[in-house]
Every structure is written in C-alpha cells, then in structure tokens.
Image (spheres, rainbow, N blue to C red):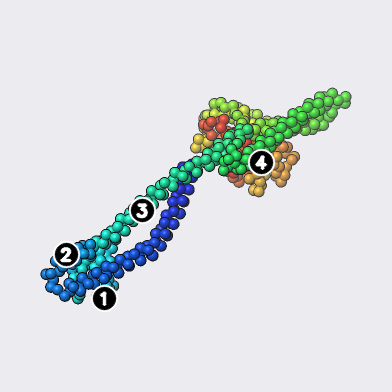
C-alpha cells in the first residue's frame, strides 16, 4: 500500500504544483505587474516634484527638506551616489530620461536628481515588502495544502487497498493448492466486480482440475480390471500360445500397466496440495547401488556413472527421485545407439543429476515442449521405442515439487537431460497447481 500511496500522492502533488505555477505565473504577469506599474505612477509624481525642488536648492538643504517631505509621503527618503547603484546600461538610460527605477532587491525606488551624480532613494516601500513576505506565506500555504491532501487520499485508498490485499492473499492460497479459496468481496467494494470475476475463475479452475483428476483416476482404475482379466484368461487358454506370442502379449500388457501407473503418478504429482515425504540421503552410494538396475532397462547399451564426489548428501523424497531417474535413464537407453552416461554433480547448492545418450537427440523445434505430457517426437523417438509421453512430464513435476527444475542441456550428440534439485530446501513448499513451462538449459 505504501508504494501505491506514494505513487498516487506524488502524481497528484505534481499536477497540483504545475497548476499552481501556471496560475502564479499568470498572476505575476498580469495583476502583480499592473499593481507595480500603478505604484510606480503614484511614486513618479511625488519624486518628480521632490527631485525638481532638490535640483533648485543647495545640497546642504536637501536633508531637512527630505525629512519634512518624508513625513508627508509616509516613506523614508535619502540620497545616494549614482555610481553606487547596481544598474544596467538600459536602467541608466531610463534614469537619464527622467524616469524612476524599481530596485527589487531592497524594495526601493530611485530617481536621478536633475543632472547631478546623485539619486533620490524612496523606501523600502511597505507594499513591496508585504508582497515579498506574502510569497513566503503562499509557499507555506501551498506546502500545508499539499500535505493535507495526503489524509483524504489515504482515506480513499485504504478500502481499495484492502480489496487488493484480499485478492493477493486468495491468489497465494490458490497457488499453494487451496482450491476452496475465494475473495468474497462485499458488494459495496469498488473491486467487487473484479472479485466476482476472480471467484468465477477460481471455481472454473477447481472444476477443471477436479474433473481432470477424476477422469485420470477413473480411467486408470477402470483399465486395471480388464487387464487383470486378460492376464487370467491368457493363463487359462486351452491351447497354449507360442513363446513369441506370449512375449508380445506380455509386452503389450506391461505397456498398458506402465501407462496406467504413469497416469496415476502424474495425476498425483499435479494434484493441488501434493506433499512430499522428505528424508536425508547420500546420493553417490545410492546411484552406484542402482546402476545394475538401470543397466537392466537397456542391456544393449553400455551405462556408465560419473561422480567426482565421494559423498553427496541431499534432503528430499527418495522414492520420487528414483522414479525420475528411472524415467530419464530408461528414456536414454531406449534411444541411445551405444552408450548412456549418468553424472552426479553439485554446483552452487544445487545437485545436478544428468543423463546423456548418443542417440538422435531432440529436434530443435521440440526443445521447448519436450517436457509436456503426452508429447510424441515421431521423427526421432517414434512409437516403436515405447512409452506414453508421460515420463519426462513426471520428471519435471518431481523437480518442481522439490523446488528444482528439469531441463535439456546443449549437446553435440544425442540428448542431455538434467535434473537440478536444491541441496537444502523446504520440500513441502513447491507443489504446483498446473504444468509450468519447461526450462531449457
């Protein structure tokens, strides 16, 4: 609120000052100038007579005559050398023509006495001194008026700010997974229409996410039943299948089961309010222990592990990390020609678990979308390699749940996927409502 108030107040004050300056310049150019000119006319007549009288009498009588004349005029009078006056050439010419000159520095009028080298000085003139003092009063009044504008602005802005705070708080609750959060602003609020629109959006979002989860869960669970029946009936066939037919059917059934498992996992990871089960782990020994299991996913390729560290402590959900790395390694082994390399690193409080293969790689136009669910890259990673397009989406969701990211690093050959996770984190604070955009390394 402070920032919004300051911006609005400064804008109002700037507009106010500009308006005052315009009005002040207009006043100074008309009324004040006319008033000064009128005063000059009044003083001109008195000074003309006095200067003429002084020019006709000896200089030793000037003082007494000016004292008597000052009482009649009501202003101080004295003479001064012409050379001591701070005058420009045009002012001197103006004096030589018999005119008077206003000295704004000390609020006095001067007129040359005849053709002598002295001038008659009248003042300070009370009216001019009052005008100067009035300018400071005007400045003080303007400052006081400007400061007093802050109170009504604050009073007017406060209910708007409260409505905005409710919107922000509700948006934060929605982002944290509380789909029941609503703004519910009163009808009298100036932001009531915005709040109603926001609540309608939240309701549609809740219905969309709930419907998607319900559909995914229902499909996955419903598919498990016929799959179980198929396995049972295949086992009870009167005439047994050939080994090749049995292996083919087994692969198809395993693919369906894997798809169902991926759908359930992805639905659980993207569900609002999803929470991890964190623990403290050492990843170097864990990776070495899983190397044999990963190699079994693709025996036709050579799998190697590179780690420059003896130990690599980490806090997070190990079961989800295993799932993410299984997906990355299996994906690399499916598309590699000869070898896959798994590397563990630690940089800037970030753990990097990367998997690189020497396969055809990912097309440049698909780099931005490679972590999207159900994406199929038919040119290089076609359907014959298996998979349902959810493996990398699951990897990204697991990374985001830990406050990290999954990305595709530049590579001269093949694909180089990387899972970046914080070493230390609050693991229950990073679940997301919807799929974010993939980050490219």
Extreme residue in the front direction: 72
Q: Is residue 131 left or right of residue 382?
A: left
Q: Residues within 10 Å of mark 4 (few under 14, many from 20)?
A: many
- Of residues 191 and 340, the one nearer the viewer is 191
Question: Label 1: how many residues lie within 10 Å, few (<14), some (14-19) or many (20+)?
Answer: few
245, 76: nearer the viewer: 76
Q: Earlier in the sequence, mark 2 or mark 3?
A: 2
**Could you say which disc has been placed on residue 372 in the image?**
4
Residue position marked by numbered label 1 in the rendering:
97
Which residue is at 58% across, 36% downward?
Answer: 170
- 4 vs 1, front mark: 1
Under circle 1, the secondary element is loop
Residue pictured at 45% horizontal, 48% vertical? 9
Q: Position of residue 284 (x, y in %)?
A: 55, 30
Which-is-in-front pick, marks 3 and 4? 3
Q: Nearer the viewer, mark 2 or mark 3?
A: 2
């Amino acid at each position: 609120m402070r920032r919004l108030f300051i911006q609005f107040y400064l804008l109002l004050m700037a507009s106010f000052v500009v308006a005052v300056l315009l009005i002040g310049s207009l006043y100074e150019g008309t009324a004040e100038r006319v008033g000064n000119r009128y005063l000059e006319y009044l003083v001109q007549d008195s000074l003309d007579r006095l200067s003429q009288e002084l020019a006709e009498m000896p200089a030793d009588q000037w003082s007494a005559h000016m004292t008597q004349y000052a009482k009649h005029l009501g202003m101080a009078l004295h003479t001064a050398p012409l050379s001591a006056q701070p005058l420009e050439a045009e002012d001197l010419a103006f004096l030589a023509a018999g005119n008077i000159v206003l000295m704004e520095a000390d609020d006095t009028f001067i007129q040359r006495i005849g053709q002598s080298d002295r001038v008659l000085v009248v003042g300070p003139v009370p009216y001019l001194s009052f005008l100067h003092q009035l300018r400071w009063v005007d400045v003080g009044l303007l400052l006081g008026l400007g400061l007093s504008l802050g109170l009504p602005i604050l009073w007017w802005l406060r209910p708007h700010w409260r409505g905005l705070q409710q919107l922000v708080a509700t948006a934060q609750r929605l982002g944290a997974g509380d789909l029941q959060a609503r703004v519910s602003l009163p009808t009298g609020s100036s932001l009531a229409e915005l709040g109603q629109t926001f609540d309608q959006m939240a309701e549609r979002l809740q219905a969309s996410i709930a419907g998607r989860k319900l559909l995914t869960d229902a499909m996955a669970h419903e598919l498990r039943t016929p799959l179980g029946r198929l396995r049972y009936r295949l086992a009870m066939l009167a005439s047994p299948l050939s080994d090749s037919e049995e292996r083919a059917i087994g692969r198809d059934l395993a693919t369906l089961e894997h798809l169902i498992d991926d759908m359930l996992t992805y639905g659980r990871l993207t569900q609002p309010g999803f929470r991890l089960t964190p623990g403290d782990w050492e990843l170097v020994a864990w990776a070495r222990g899983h190397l044999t299991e990963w190699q079994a996913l693709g025996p036709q390729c050579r799998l190697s592990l590179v780690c420059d560290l003896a130990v690599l402590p980490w806090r997070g959900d190990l079961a989800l990390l295993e799932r993410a790395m299984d997906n990355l390694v299996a994906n690399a082994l499916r598309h590699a020609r000869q070898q896959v390399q798994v590397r563990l690193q630690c940089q800037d409080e970030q753990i990097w678990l990367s998997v690189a293969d020497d396969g055809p790689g990912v097309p440049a136009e698909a780099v931005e979308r490679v972590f999207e669910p159900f994406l199929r890259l038919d040119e290089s990673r076609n359907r014959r390699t298996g998979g349902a397009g959810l493996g990398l989406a699951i990897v990204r969701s697991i990374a985001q749940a830990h406050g990290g990211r999954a990305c595709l690093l530049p590579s001269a050959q093949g694909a180089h996927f990387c899972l970046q996770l914080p070493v230390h984190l609050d693991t229950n604070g990073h679940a997301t409502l919807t799929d974010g955009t993939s980050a490219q390394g």
